[in-house]
Image (cartoon, grey):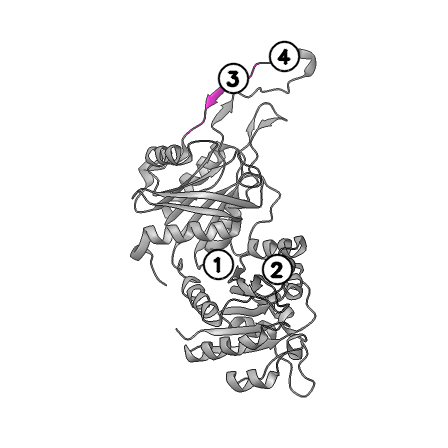
Amino acid sequence: MNPHIVLGVSGGIAAYKSVEVLRGIVQRGGQAQVALTRGAREFISPLTFAVLSGREVHTEVWGSGQTAAVDHVALADWSDLLLIAPATAHTMAKLANGLADDFLSTYFLAHRKRTLLAPAMESAMWEHPAVVANRDALARRGVRFVGPARGPLASGQEGIGRMAEPLDILEEAWRLLAESEDLAGLKVLVTAAATREPLDPIRFVSNRSSGRMGYALAEAARDRGAAVTLLSGPTHLTPPTRVRSLSFQTSADLQALLLQEFPDCDVLVMAAAVADFIPLAEPERMHREQGDRTVALTAGPDLLASLAPLRRSQTVVAFAAETEDLEARGRRKMEKKSADLIVVNDVGRSGIGFDAEDNEVLILGRDGSKEVVSRRPKRAVADKIWDAVRAVRGAAIPRT
C-alpha cells in the first residue's frame, strides 16, 4: 500500500509528535502533503516537515506569495486520507462548522475520502459541551477519531486529552485506508425511515423513526466503495449525495420497491421501521361530529418473507426495535426472517434509537456471534454494522 496522505497539523504542544507521524508515513511507503495551521507554526517550523516529506508545506489558501497557490480541489483528487494530528478544539470547531480561513480548513471542505482526527487538548476542553457537540457533528459525517488518551497533559495535570501515540495513529490510519474500499463492487440496498399507513385521506398511522440510522448506513456504505440505493420513507433528512434514492410512503409502496430492487443487490439492510399493523382506511375524511370511532387493524406483511423466492446469495441484515429480552427476541426474529445478521436496539431507553442522534445496538449473527456496540453517533454505529457484514461475506465480496 502506497497511500497519498494529507497530514494536517494544528496548534498544540503535541505538534512535535506530528514529525514522528510524518516519518512513519514515509517509512511505510506513503506520500504526504503537510498543511500547517497558523497556530502550528508557533510550535514547529514548516521546514522540518518540508525536509521529511520532500514537499512544500502549505499554510494559506493563496500560497506564500512567492510560489503558485495549490489547487485544494486537485489535492483532494490526489489524496486517499486526511489525517490531522494534533486536532485542537479550535480546528475541530472550524471543521464542524464549515469555516475556511486557512489552507487546512479550506482543504477539508474539498476532501471526499476518509478523515482521521487525533485530538489533543486539556480534559476540561475535551469534555466541554461545545467540543462534544462539534466532535459528534463530525462523527455523524463520517470523520473518525483516534484517541485522545489519558496521561500527563500540557498543564501538568493528568487526564483525558493527550494525543494518541504516533504508532497508534499510524496503525489506525492504515486500518482506515484498508477499509476505505472494502465494500467496492457491492450493490447495497438500504431501507430507512417509517412507513405511513392511511386512516383516511388526511390522517395516517406511523412511528417515531427519523431515518437517521438508515441514512447513516447508506452514507457509510457509499464511503466504503459500495454502489448504494436508498429506499426512504418520509423524513426531514437530506438525501445523501452520490447515493441513488427512491421514496415510499406505505408498507405496500416499500414492498413494491423491494421486489423491484432486491434481485439485483448483494446486500439488503432493512433499517426502515415498517408498520406491524395496518388500519382499514376510510375512503372519506372522518369528522369529529360523527362521534367515537373504532379503527380495525390488520397485521402488516412480512416484507423479508415476501423476498424469499427472489433470494440468491444476498446478505440480509434485519433490524429489531425492542424494549425487553433484546437478545432472545432478536435471535427469534433473525431465524424467522432468515436474516444473516440482526441489529437490535432498546427503544425504551432515552437518547438512543428512534429520533435520536446516537444509538447503542446488539449485532447478532446466525453463527451465534454477538457484538455489543456501545452508545455512539449513528454514523459510527453504521460502520460497525458494515464491519459485521464484511465479516459475514468475507471473500465473497467482489473486487473492482
Of 142 and 281, the residue lying toward us: 142
Labels 3 and 2 touching (C-beta < 8 A): no
| Residue of label 2 | 123
| Image depth: mark 2 or mark 1 in front | 2
Question: What residue is at 47 percent from the left and 39 percent from the top?
Answer: 345
Q: Is residue 249 above or below residue 237?
A: above
Assign the magenta stretch its main secondary structure. Answer: loop
| Residue of label 4 | 292
Q: Which of marks 3 and 1 is nearer the N terminus?
A: 1
Q: In this view, does 206 lie above or below 111?
A: above
Q: Can residue 46 be seen in this view?
A: yes
Q: What kind of residue is marked 1? A: Asp
Labels 3 and 1 touching (C-beta < 8 A): no
Of 201 and 358, the residue lying toward us: 358
| Residue of label 1 | 223
* Magenta segment includes 99: no
Q: What kind of residue is marked 4? A: Asp
Query: Which residues, given as a range, are shown in magenta?
Result: 291-301
| Residue of label 3 | 296
Other residues around mark 4 within 10 Å, as few (<14) / some (14–19) / many (≥20): few
Left-right relation of 10 to 114: right
